């Protein structure tokens, strides 16, 4: 009965797209997205900090390789803690409140790193920035998805990944030119811009409706769509859906595994498994050493990698609402398989000393094909779909679970990569190819196309 109530307004209501576009204004949507993705830029600044600063920090603070490795890796543990708490925080204090908390942790962490004179304060700062990253990784795409109109939602949510890539690449470049303490202060800039910007943008209307703030809900939706826009159909659809959800029992973590939510949880968590266990963090963190081991200049390879990642991620954001999520995921996963197999072939030839002159070219081709393919879909789209498929009454718990799985996968792949590479260089990439082939099957069987549908329509179709 509840499911019928959920689906009725979704089938009955149709918005005249042309009429809506003539009256609505997307200025506030774009401004809100810009403010939100400052969190993504802060995320990327944290992720890209340790690589260019390793030699200078170890020299200035007299750290051993093991001590610096702890400093680098503790970021992921902080992110896992942030992932666990991100959903409940965003549900309790709102999307804007969660962004403020995350910015505060990142800023405090950067200040600790700036003033650090020893390992303990340095690691505490890194842990705090990691916590902020974990919260940002969930809240930013969810906030954007909840404020964006359906025809722009894919592009705007994908801007999250674009800003992460841009910040990582920028950290790589400027980190080699300035002192590591100054780079830590620069890391605070997007946090400051975010906190200031939040005073000028509205809260998520869907969260306001869920918490019963009806007056603020109408004000926020009106502000986002423009004063001349007709928001009655969209507002009714959101409220009808949330009223139906409110009649269902309050959900706890173990309720995620009930049949009514199982498909959305499998989709959200499964895409995070596909994204991370396909090898991205191992390849990303050790790109330079992979190129060098294949006989190609590591610095040149890293620069090409960074530029390609930004360009292709930007193109992905532009075409996401036109091409659709599912086709891009399938193209991306297919490219990942081919990239892994090409890289595996290069290391196989090197191991058995066959056609050694072709090894560098094959390795570069394979890695760059992998990066282009990942940026074309598997990098951004799992976060887009994660923000779309969970009903708002389980979004906090389910989003935390999906984000935690993502960060655990990031840690597991980066931790095991060197061990696998020492076991068998070509075997490592064959394993990743097999996992990415499994991702193709998963996308075909489980992932729906969400392009051009409201969040309520998507969630009702999946969970109904």
Image (cartoon, helix red, strand yellow):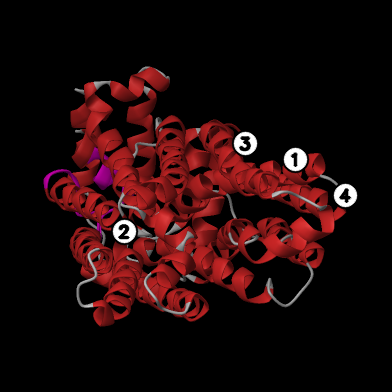
Q: Earlier in the sequence, mark 3 or mark 4?
A: 3
Q: Quadrant where the C terminus lies?
A: top left
Residue found at x 21% / y 49%: 439
Whichever of callouts 4 and 2 sits on the residue coming sooner in the sequence is 4
> Marks 3 and 2: which is nearer the front?
2
* Disc on the earlier residue, 3 or 2: 3
Q: Earlier in the sequence, mark 1 or mark 2?
A: 1
How far apart marks 1 and 2 lie (CA) works out to 32 Å
Residue 154, image x, y percentages: 35, 62
Q: Nearer the viewer, mark 4 or mark 2?
A: 4
Q: Where residue 265 sits: x, y (%)?
A: 30, 34
Give the vertical position of 11 relative to 3 (above or below).
Answer: below
- Left or right of 181 on screen, residue 254: left
Name the residue rendered at 30%, 63% in the picture: 377
Of the two numbered discs 1 and 4 on the same chain, state the one appearing first in sequence.
4
Q: Say what secondary structure mark 1 lies in.
A: helix
Which residue lies under the disc numbered 3? 93
Q: Which residue is mark 4?
A: 117
| Residue lying at 66% horizontally and 56% vertically, measured from the top left | 198
Look at mark 2 in the image and give the residue it sits on.
Answer: 378
Discs 1/2, front: 1
Per the rendered image, the range of residues in magenta is 445-460
Q: Do tag 1 and tag 2 residues touch (Cβ < 8 Å)?
A: no
């Amino acid at each position: 009965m509840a499911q019928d109530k959920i689906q009725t307004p979704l089938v009955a209501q149709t918005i005249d797209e042309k009429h809506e576009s003539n009256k609505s204004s997307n200025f506030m949507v774009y401004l809100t997205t810009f403010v939100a993705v400052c969190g993504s830029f802060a995320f990327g600044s944290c992720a890209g900090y340790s690589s260019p600063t390793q030699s200078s920090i170890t020299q200035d603070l007299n750290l051993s390789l093991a001590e610096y490795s702890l400093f680098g890796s503790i970021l992921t543990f902080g992110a896992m803690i942030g992932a666990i708490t991100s959903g409940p925080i965003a549900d309790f204090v709102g999307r804007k409140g969660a962004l403020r908390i995350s910015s505060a942790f990142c800023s405090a962490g950067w200040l600790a790193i700036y003033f650090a004179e020893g390992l303990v304060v340095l690691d505490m700062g890194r842990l705090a920035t990691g916590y902020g990253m974990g919260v940002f990784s969930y809240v930013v795409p969810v906030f954007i998805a909840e404020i964006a109109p359906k025809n722009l939602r894919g592009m705007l949510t994908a801007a999250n990944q674009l800003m992460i890539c841009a910040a990582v690449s920028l950290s790589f470049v400027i980190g080699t030119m300035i002192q590591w303490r100054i780079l830590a202060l620069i890391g605070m800039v997007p946090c400051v811009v975010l906190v200031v910007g939040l005073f000028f943008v509205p809260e998520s209307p869907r969260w306001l409706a869920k918490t019963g703030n009806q007056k603020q809900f109408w004000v926020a939706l009106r502000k986002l769509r423009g004063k001349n826009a007709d928001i009655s159909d969209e507002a009714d659809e959101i409220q009808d859906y949330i009223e139906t959800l409110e009649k269902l029992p309050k959900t706890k973590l173990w309720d995620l595994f009930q049949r009514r939510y199982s498909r959305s949880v499998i989709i959200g968590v499964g895409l995070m498994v596909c994204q991370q266990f396909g090898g991205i963090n191992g390849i990303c963190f050790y790109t330079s050493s992979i190129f060098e081991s294949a006989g190609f200049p590591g610095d040149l390879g890293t620069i090409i990698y960074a530029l390609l990642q930004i360009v292709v991620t930007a193109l992905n954001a532009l075409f996401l609402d036109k091409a659709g999520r599912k086709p891009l995921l399938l193209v991306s996963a297919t490219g990942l398989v081919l990239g892994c197999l090409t890289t595996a072939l290069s290391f196989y030839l090197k191991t058995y000393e066959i056609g050694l002159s072709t090894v560098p070219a094959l390795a570069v081709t394979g890695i760059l094909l992998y990066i282009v393919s990942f940026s074309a879909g598997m990098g951004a789209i799992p976060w887009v779909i994660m923000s779309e498929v969970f009903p708002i009454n389980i979004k906090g718990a389910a989003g935390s679970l999906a984000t935690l799985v993502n960060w655990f996968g990031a840690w597991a792949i980066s931790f095991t990569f060197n061990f696998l590479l020492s076991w068998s260089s070509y075997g490592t990439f064959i394993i990743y190819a097999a996992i990415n082939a499994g991702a193709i099957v998963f996308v075909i069987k489980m992932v729906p196309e969400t392009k051009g549908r409201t969040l309520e329509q998507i969630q009702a179709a999946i969970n109904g």
